[in-house]
Image (spheres, helix red, strand yellow):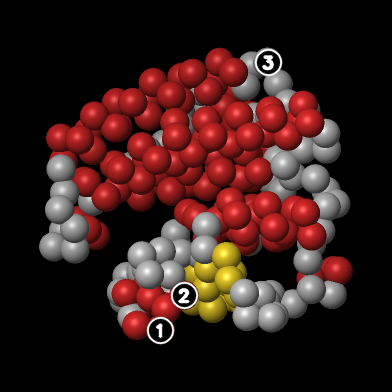
């Protein structure tokens, strides 16, 4: 398999961490990481647009030539193909909980954090139309969501319950991506969230 990805982007990182949790290398599964630099606009090159007409990343190319374009679609295929450990849940209730929390992590953290970056960071100047005021509205929203998530994590070890899942992967990638926009956890304020973050950060897959 080949994973076309940018090492600095959050969505490819979600897939890399997911693969690391599955320990595909130990299973004899070869995955080649092919860098497609967003900074160099390689994602807009004709060869990549053939893989993904929107120029987005990641893209997984299977050995038979089939491709998957979205990070969660890729992770779901991996989870069903290599089900141990079950990062999308082990039964119907767990799967529903993981889906719920992964959606929370995407919509309440990753999306607004991405909008802060896209609308306020100099990286995107001249590349896209920016709306700095909208970016600052999203910054306020993220502050509210961090307080909400800190409260939630006072009731369970990981986002979706007692087990590490894809929801935790999405959340930690979102929070780390926020650092480029000067978003940081305050251990004195976000005590539960920081406890969770340090626990997730200690996993070997975090560095994938």
Residue 80 location, quadrant: bottom right
Q: Tell me: residue 83, above or below residue 16.
A: above
Q: Residues within 10 Å of mark 1 (few under 14, many from 20)?
A: few
The one of 119 and 96 positioned closer to us in this rendering: 96
Q: Quadrant of the C terminus?
A: bottom right
Alpha-carbon span between mark 3 and mark 1: 47 Å
Q: Where does residue 144 sit, x and y in percent of width and height?
A: 39, 21
Left or right for 203, reference 114: right
In front of the other: label 3 or label 2?
2
Disc ID at residue 51? 2
- Residue at figure coordinates x 57%, y 27% from the top left: 193
Marks 3,1: beta carbons within 8 A: no
Q: Where does residue 86 sit, x and y in percent of width and height?
A: 80, 45
Q: Tell me: residue 59, above or below residue 176.
A: below
The one of 47 and 119 positioned closer to us in this rendering: 47
Q: Where does residue 7 sit, x and y in percent of width and height?
A: 49, 66
From where the camera sits, is residue 181 visible?
no
Residue 139 location, quadrant: top left
Q: Quadrant of the N terminus?
A: bottom right
Q: Secondary structure at mark 2?
A: helix
Residue 90 location, quadrant: top right
């Amino acid at each position: 398999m080949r994973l076309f990805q940018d090492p600095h982007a959050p969505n490819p990182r979600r897939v890399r961490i997911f693969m690391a949790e599955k320990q595909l290398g130990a299973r004899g599964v070869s995955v080649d990481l092919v860098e497609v630099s967003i900074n160099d606009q390689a994602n807009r090159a004709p060869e990549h647009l053939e893989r993904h007409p929107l120029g987005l990343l990641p893209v997984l190319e299977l050995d038979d030539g089939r491709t998957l374009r979205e990070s969660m679609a890729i992770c779901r295929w991996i989870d069903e193909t290599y089900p141990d450990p079950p990062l999308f849940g082990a039964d119907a209730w767990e799967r529903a909980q993981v889906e719920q929390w992964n959606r929370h992590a995407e919509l309440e953290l990753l999306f607004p954090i991405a909008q802060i970056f896209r609308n306020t960071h100099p990286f995107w100047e001249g590349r896209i139309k920016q709306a700095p005021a909208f970016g600052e509205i999203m910054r306020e929203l993220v502050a509210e969501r961090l307080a909400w998530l800190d409260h939630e994590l006072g009731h369970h070890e990981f986002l979706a319950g007692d087990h590490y899942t894809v929801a935790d992967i999405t959340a930690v990638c979102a929070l780390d991506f926020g650092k480029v926009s000067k978003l940081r956890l305050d251990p004195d304020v976000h005590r539960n969230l920081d406890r969770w973050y340090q626990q997730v950060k200690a996993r070997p897959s975090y560095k994938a």
